[in-house]
Amino acid sequence: MSDDDPLLDSPLEAGFRAAHQALRILAPPNTVATAGDAYLPDIIDELEDLVRLARDTAAAHLGPTIRWVAPQPPRDQWAQVIVQVDLDGYSKDDPLGAFHIDDWEDSALARAGRAYRRECGWDFSPGEAGIWLLSVAPYSSMGGGDRTSWKGTLSGFAILHDRDDDGEYESLAHLWTAYSWRRRGVGLARIFHGAAGRGGGLVGVCG
């Protein structure tokens, strides 16, 4: 390389290396990353992966960000709510039409499922199936007619399945609450209450 190689003397280098170091700190434990003094292109190439890993850390601790549509807000519009997502057919969504997934791997549900899998030490995350009861903490809304677009944090979930194909979701398969929402009486307890009375066996629970 020549002495005037811009990769060896870039005014952007310090910023890229600082971003890389900050994202390494936010990545999950035991993440293998490029050393901070690596060649600048290698540092830059790894930023996208580290951003994804940092989002996984946020999902595990705070819960992933989720968007949905619902009727006009209740009196206490910032209270946690339960949103029901029917991944088997979207016919039992509550509110109806609240949520639809275009890209499962980048969805809030998939990110929460991966956090749950890592904490439990399992080989696979819950998939795109069953009815998911989501405990959500709203933090932003925008009204439009009789519907409101919401943004919130998915603080926990319960997953129900219709194991005997009788149209009733009686099997409670999974329960999870994001780390920072535990011991508050608003995460797992709310979801479990929403799923109570449906019977069935519990497969897994973390948090």
Image (spheres, grey):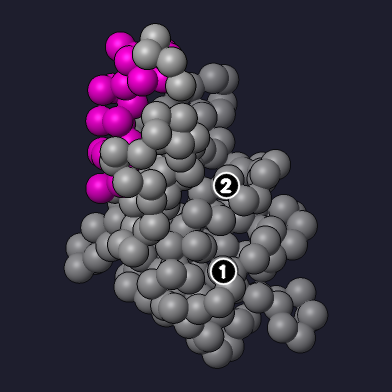
Foreground pick, 170 / 3 = 3
Looking at the image, is 131 positioned above or below residue 10? below
Where residue 92 appears, x then y in whole percent? 68, 57
Foreground pick, 19 / 35 = 35
N-term mark: 1 or 2: 2
Question: Residue drawn 33% across and 26% down?
Answer: 16
Q: Which residues are magenta?
A: 5-25
Where residue 179 appears, x then y in whole percent? 28, 62
Please state, as top left, top right, bottom left or bottom right, where the C terminus lies in the image: bottom left
Amino acid under disc 1: Ser
Residue lying at the far right of the rendered structure: 165
Residue 128 makes an appearance in the image: yes
Residue 80 makes an appearance in the image: no
User: Of helix, strand and loop, which one carries label 1?
Assistant: loop
Where residue 116 appears, x then y in whole percent? 44, 68
Q: CA distance from mark 1 to mark 2?
A: 13 Å
User: Of helix, strand and loop, which one carries label 2?
Assistant: loop
Question: Residue drawn 39% across and 34% down?
Answer: 39
Q: Which residue is mark 1?
A: 125
Which numbered marker is on residue 73? none
Q: Which residue is mark 2?
A: 107
Residue lying at the far bottom of the rendered structure: 201
Question: Residue drawn 25% across and 30% down?
Answer: 18
In which image quadrant can residue 101 be found? top right
For this view, does 57 lie left or right of residue 195? Answer: left
**Is 19 part of what is drawn in magenta?**
yes
Amino acid under disc 2: Ser
Foreground pick, 35 / 122 = 35
Question: Residue drawn 56% across and 26% down?
Answer: 146
User: What type of secondary structure mainly makes up the magenta span?
Assistant: helix
